[in-house]
Amino acid sequence: MTTNKLRPVERLNGTGTVITKSGKEISVQYHLCFSADSEGPEAEDSSPAGLKELSGQVWCPHDGSFVCVHSGQTMTLCMEDGRRLRFAHRNRDGGISVIKWIG
């Protein structure tokens, strides 16, 4: 029996800045987890660095309405380590969908 499970590869936690479509900068917290297919080495060749999925949350600890107010909007997350990505919230808990990695 073959199972297709994702295993955590890298976790990112920290404080960052979200830039909204209108250019407003908001201080946020984030928790992201990159996962890879655990099928074996051949599966790791199917995407860059074997990464299959990114899951996580972005929320504002000072504004409980942040997720609801910006739900469905494309925003940019600037992380502590300098990486940036465009995302949108996919649920009310702050879960995100990555639209595009900027760098």
Image (spheres, rainbow, N blue to C red):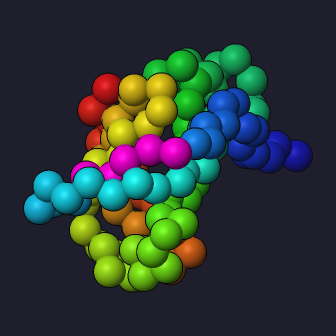
- Quick one: 39 or 63, which is closer to the camera? 63
Q: Is residue 12 above or below residue 94?
A: above
Residue 66 shown in magenta: no
Q: Is residue 72 above or below residue 83?
A: below
Instruction: Give the overall secondary structure of the magenta segment.
Output: strand
Q: Is residue 17 above or below residue 7?
A: below
Direction from residue 76 to residue 53 in the image, left or right: right
- Quick one: 15 or 70, which is closer to the camera? 15
Is residue 88 in view from this perspective? yes
Question: At 73% from the left edge and 38% from the top edge, which residue is drawn?
Answer: 8
Is residue 90 in view from this perspective? no
- Quick one: 23 or 56, which is closer to the camera? 23
Residue 16 shown in magenta: yes
What's the magenta region? 15-19
Residue 74, quarter of the rendered image: bottom left
Q: Residue furthest right?
A: 1
